[in-house]
Each structure stands twice: as structure tokens, then as C-alpha cells.
Image (tube, rainbow, N blue to C red):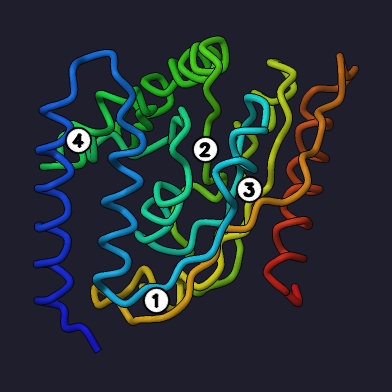
Amino acid sequence: MPTTIHNISAFLKQATACLREYKATPEGKPTQAIKQLYSRRFLQDVGIEIEGPTHDEIAALPPAIFVANHASMLDALLICAFFDTDLRILAKSGLFRAPYIGRILQREKHIRVYRGKNAHDRNRQIRDDIGAAIAEGASVFMFPEGTRTPDGAMHDFKLGAFFNAIQMQVPIIPVAIHGTFEAMPKTGIAIRPGKCKLELLAPIAPPMNPSDERSAAETLALDTKKAVEAALGSKE
């Protein structure tokens, strides 16, 4: 079983190689395939076997808001291991200042989410960022639980993703992330070898011009959560 030291070494090795290729890629050229390659190499190095959609399956999808359960720090790497298309992930603002990761997040125009003091006001730009991404033909990936689950169970969804889907008339694509909690739960720093799966579920179309937008968003959130729970085999 890989040790924590091995895992840290694997991250530094793959992140350094990834960033080196980023720096060598001219501005304006796509870099998602670079991130995909090194995400896969890292997961392989730490003993994670991955399963997920093919490139053609992802490329055939229209711009959408992808919504998933949030189980682990490995979730983002699993997503990157399959998406080599233009996908903007909502990420904590602090990650944009982090070594290695921050440069990638900024260059690929991922979307900042602020926490703490004045977070509500600072997050007002998120809707505009999502709208800009959709207008550019990109998709957006959100974790509506807001943070990683501490216990492996899914928690209530915040409504932002669903308001945006209704207002921008783009589908919600539910995503079930399997195995990452077992590999690296929120309370741990070690990575346990195992199998992780990214499962794309059937798109859910938002209602058009609902008379009660909040009620429509709540229904859309509930339908999405039920779809993900069913895929995960939840008994809740």
C-alpha cells in the first residue's frame, strides 16, 4: 500500500510535470488534456483505479451544469481525469493562490467561491461567471452540498446551481462520484488504494419560465439529489 510520503511525492512529481507543460503551452491554447493526463497519472501512482465516461460521451453533451455529490479531495482529480473539454469548476478562492493548482485554475477560468467575511457580497459575481462560461460554450461543475461530506452521506443541496440552470435554460446533468470517500475521507490525509468511478446520469431539463422560481429550483434540486442517491445506492 502506498504510504503518505509516497502520495505526497507522487503529487509533487505529477504537478510539477503538469505545470511545466502548462508554461510551455502558448496562451489561448487549450490545456485541459494536459490536466487530464497528469490527473490520471497521479491517481494511478497512488493506487486508484478509475472508471468513467469516454471522451466521445462527454464531447457529445451540450453546455450544462454538472452537479455531483462531494465526498473527498480526490473528487476534483477524478473529474479532471475524464474531462478534457472546457469545464469550469467552482472552487474555493484560496485554491487560486495555492502552488501548482492556482495557476491552472486561473488559466482555465475556473470560478472562485468565497467563504468567511463578506462572502455573500463577494459571491455575487458567480452568476455572471457561470453565464460567461455557458456563453463561451463551456460547461460548469458544481458541488451543491458546499463542502465535502464528513460522514459519507449526502447532505442537503444549496439552490444556486438550480437557479442558474432555470435562468440560463441549460440542463442539469447529475453526476454520482463513487469510491472517493473510501479512498480519502474528509477527516483523513492518507489515500487508500481502490476503485473510483465517475458516473454521468440522465440530464434533467429545467422548467421554462416558472411562476415560482424558488419552488422550481427546490424541485429541481430534489430531483437531482434523488437521482444521485439512487446511483450511489443510498438508502436514505
Query: Which circle's residue, 2 or 1, is located before the other in the chain?
Result: 2
Mark sitting on residue 141: 2
Which residue is identified by label 4? 102
Looking at the image, residue 90 sits to the left or right of residue 142; the answer is: left
- Residue contact at pointers 1 and 3, CB within 8 angstroms: no
Cα–Cα span, label 2 and label 1: 21 Å
**Disc 1 residue type (three-letter):** Ala
Residue appearing at x 66%, y 33% in the figure? 60
Considering depth in this image, is 204 or 37 the residue closer to the camera? 37
Indicate the position of residue 89 as horizontal and vertical percent values: 43, 36
Describe the element under mark 4 as helix, strand or loop: helix
Cα–Cα span, label 1 and label 3: 23 Å
Looking at the image, residue 194 sits to the left or right of residue 174; the answer is: left
Cα–Cα span, label 4 and label 1: 24 Å
Query: Which circle's residue, 1 or 3, is located before the other in the chain?
Result: 3
Q: Residues within 10 Å of mark 2 (few under 14, many from 20)?
A: many
Q: Looking at the image, which residue sits at the far right?
A: 211
Residue appearing at x 17%, y 60% in the figure? 11
